Amino acid sequence: MENLASRNPVAALLSHLEPDACLVKYHGLSTIGVFMRTKIIVYAALLSLGFVITAWARPGALPVSPAQEGEMPLMNEPRQKPVTPPVPPRGQMLYENHCMSCHESVVHIRGNHRTQSLAELRGRVSHWANALHLRWGKEEVEEVVTHLNDRYYKFESR
């Protein structure tokens, strides 16, 4: 009988697993072919068994009824509403962007304020807006004055 390992490189590799597999033929089908098919079936069974065991090991992998599916959020839906940070008042943003570069809030909390009234505060804000060429109108000046008064000065508004 002809040695299959001499002609077939796969048979040569597998001959060490089953020494007689390369020498025997059964009804025109070599034992190596039967051996390979059996090996593939065993590997496929073990692989699918591994997937089943992995699925059983995860507690959330159990089948879900259609009623429960309707209650579950979809993967692309957010589970809770997004939190948006609070938007600071416009006067605060104007002050922080244009005034904080020259002085910090220490100027407003020192004991000897130069500003003694809301009208003086409005005049100072307007003066520095013009000196810095900010092109603020009455609305922007009033918003910054409101921010400074609410936060630091606490003058009574009229």
Image: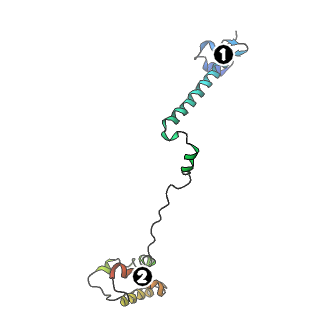
Q: Residue at 40% across / 82% down in the picture?
A: 146
Where residue 3 sits: x, y (%)? Answer: 67, 13
> Is 15 rendered above or below residue 44?
above
Where residue 99 sits: x, y (%)? Answer: 40, 79
Q: Disc 1 or 2, which lies upstream in sequence?
A: 1
Check if mark 1's residue and mark 2's residue have beta carbons within 8 Å.
Answer: no
Left or right, 95 with reference to 64? left
Disc 1 versus disc 2: nearer the observer: 2
Where residue 102 sits: x, y (%)? Answer: 38, 79
Most extreme residue toward the top is 1
Q: Residue at 62% across / 25% down in the picture?
A: 41
On the rendered image, what quadrant is the N terminus found in? top right
Most extreme residue toward the front is 67
Left or right, 145 with reference to 79? left
Where residue 40 sits: x, y (%)? Answer: 62, 25
Please tell me in which quadrant of the rendered image residue 38 appears: top right
Front one among 99 and 150: 150
> Is 25 rendered above or below residue 55?
above
Left or right, 35 with reference to 84? right
| Distance between mark 1 and mark 2 Cα atoms | 92 Å
The circle on residue 144 is 2
Dot 1 falls on a residue whose secondary structure is helix
The circle on residue 57 is none
> Which residue carries the number 1 mark?
31
> Is 68 rendered above or below residue 53?
below
Dot 2 falls on a residue whose secondary structure is helix
On the rendered image, what quadrant is the C terminus found in? bottom left
Question: What amino acid is found at the position of numbered circle 1 in the picture?
Answer: Thr
Please tell me in which quadrant of the rendered image residue 148 appears: bottom left
Dot 1: few (<14), some (14–19), or many (≥20) neighbours within 10 Å? some
Q: Residue at 52% across / 56% down in the picture?
A: 78
> Is 100 rendered above or below residue 123?
above
